[in-house]
Amino acid sequence: MARKTIPAGGTLPFSKATIHDSKYVMEISGQVGLNPETGKLEEGIEQQTIRTLENIKQILSEKGWNFNNLIKVRIFLIDMADYSKVNKIYAKHFSGEYPARVALAVKELPLGALIEIDCTAAGDVIKV
């Protein structure tokens, strides 16, 4: 996959834009910090963010992809005061360029979650 970004600059973990030339595009539905083993939400924004990203990582890996395949990420937060905490955790999951991203504050999320993330990934090869 050819992916180019226009960096946002500074230390923020996202790009202004992502350009890709890929054969396949995957839309990943909104994921929350639900632990697949217990069926329960993790506690607190940090643990929910980690679990949400792990859930996305698992979905990507099912097709042989990883976070480098992400081209757009949408983050929904109950409390924008959690933005910097989420950014610190989010940044650790990427090497190199970040995908384009938006973060929005919302009134509530499914299951009482504190964060929900949906995203778009692209690549030239998928595991079938």
Image: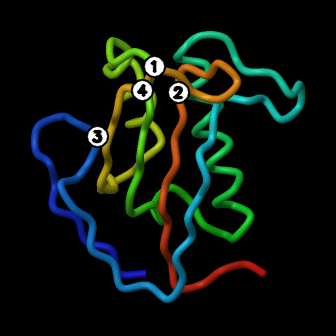
> Hey, what amino acid is under mark 2?
Ile
- Residue holding disc 4: 106
Q: Quadrant of the C terminus?
A: bottom right
**Farthest left residue?**
9
Q: Are marks 4 and 1 in contact (CB under 8 Å)?
A: yes
Residue at image coords 48%, 42%: 93
Mark 3 or mark 2, which is nearer to you?
A: 2
Of helix, strand and loop, which one carries label 2? strand
Lower sequence index among marks 3 and 2: 3
The x, y position of residue 12, in whole percent, is 22, 36
Of helix, strand and loop, which one carries label 4? loop
Label 4 to label 2, Cα distance in Å?
9 Å
- Residue holding disc 1: 78
Label 2 to label 1, Cα distance in Å?
7 Å
Q: Quadrant of the N terminus?
A: bottom left
Label 3 to label 2, Cα distance in Å?
17 Å
- Residue holding disc 2: 115
> Hey, what amino acid is under mark 4?
Val
Disc sitting over residue 13 in the figure: 3
Q: Examine the image and state in which quarter residue 112 appears.
A: top right
Other-residue count near label 1 (Cα within 10 Å), few / some / many at <14 / 14–19 / ≥20: some
